[in-house]
Image (cartoon, rainbow, N blue to C red):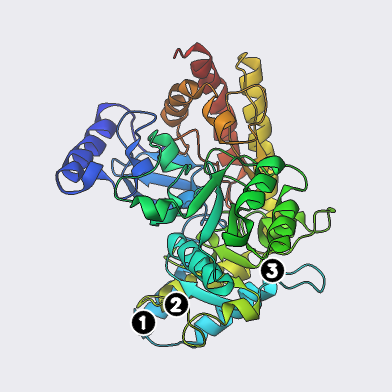
Amino acid sequence: MSAERGVSVTDRNDDLFDAARAVIPGGVNSPVRAYGSVGGTPRFLASARGARVTDAAGTEYVDLVASWGPALLGHTHPIVVEAVQEAATRGLSFGAPTEGEVELAELIADRVRFGETRPVERVRLVSTGTEATMTAIRLARGATGRDLLVKFAGHYHGHSDGLLAAAGSGVATLALPGSAGVPAPIAAQTLVIDYNDPDALAAVFAEHGPRIAAVIVEAASANMGVVPPLPGFNALIAETAHAHGALMILDEVLTGFRVHPAGFWGLQQGTGEEYQPDIFTFGKVVGGGMPLAALGGRADIMDLLAPLGPVYQAGTLSGNPLSVAAGLATLKLATPEAYALVDAAADRVATALDRALTDAGVVHTVPRAGNLFGVAFAPEVPRDYAQAQAQESFRYAPFFHAMREQGVALPPSVFEAWFLTAAHTDDDLAVIEQALPAAAAAAASATA
């Protein structure tokens, strides 16, 4: 590691956190960063390269956060950085169409395919995952003329008003049932049901079918920990929605282009689980670490967006040229070889995690969804939000801090996925493997 651990490291981060709390609510600009569920002082990061990040005190860590997913290739990939720098010399923002937007939209549409099936015929670029899902829902309501939305408990689709009922990720970490400031009539338009529960899905459509515009679902849940869909469940959602004249919105903001060249949808195709969502949402990897997200789907639905149709969406920074440059460079570099590196690294770390916790006698599972995985301190892989919340989550904080003390940065919540990158070297992976036994011992000794 690049700096001494101890007082000098803690003081600088403490000082920054104190200063931040004086001017920023909670000292952070996104809640999970505050370390609320693990305790201690957040690391204020100063730089990153490859699979490593360095905090404001100069301490280096092997990173398993990867900017919450976008850093598929690793941090500051030289080709991506060069593309952004070159774009910046031509202008930071135009508020007008650019050639790069067309190229990126074409690339997104071309990647989401299985054989002759190409469910993304049109693409609209936006700035954030929240904006993508918010627009997808408005579009579904405009397309169907219906108001109600079905979502699954523990799934997180951004922080727009109608989506914070029984959400995961930060809301789960903070143990909040929803959010203040959301009017009851808006919340009432969202019907929340249990994930991976075919009976609940059938029941909500039996009662409300003619009023349901869409079902929105994470392609594989990764905001209440990694909770993969049961075999056939995503296909069942599409079948049930379509049978009742509703749409399926597949939220691939996190999984899109991270677990497969065509996202989690692509990973499932050819496995006997073929299905066709009506609208996809993308984020994270699609922007290469810059603020960019997208929604895409069938032409007849997407063409309802303004200026062609009556469903309005706009954004001054939509298709920002720097973000587009980063996204284009990242997706072009996201080759089969890059995915093979990420998959192999994920396999190695997940195996080492399972072995260390088993050797320490800790009850656990290591849920997987492609190269996404996490830890659940439960005897079985959770299948829904209630099971995810019922785990012995108190074991995560000591596990997290033990890993950090040994130079490994984990997500500061048990309800988040771990992210590997194509830049994790054998040396990086060895640091993780060597840190796990002591962290597992810390988890074993934890008490509620």
Residue lying at 52% horizontally and 41% vertically, measured from the top left: 154
Q: Do we see residue 30 in this rendering?
A: yes
> Where 332 sits versus 229, above or below?
below
Q: Which residue is mark 1?
A: 89
Identify the image quadrant of residue 301: bottom right
| Secondary structure state at the residue bearing disc 3 | loop
Image quarter where the C terminus lies is top left
User: Within 10 Å of the Cα at label 3, are there few (<14), some (14-19), or many (20+) other Cα atoms?
Assistant: many
| Secondary structure state at the residue bearing disc 1 | helix
User: Within 10 Å of the Cα at label 1, are there few (<14), some (14-19), or many (20+) other Cα atoms?
Assistant: few
> Where 326 sits versus 381, above or below?
below
User: Within 10 Å of the Cα at label 2, are there few (<14), some (14-19), or many (20+) other Cα atoms?
Assistant: many
Q: Which residue is mark 2?
A: 319
77 or 290, nearer to the observer: 290
In the image, 155: left or right of 35?
A: right
> Where 77 sits versus 61, above or below?
below
Q: Amino acid at mark 1?
A: Thr
Residue lying at 55% horizontally and 50% vertically, measured from the top left: 151
Query: Which tag, 1 or 3, sits closer to the chain's start?
Result: 1
Q: Amino acid at mark 2?
A: Gly
Q: Do we see residue 213 in this rendering?
A: no
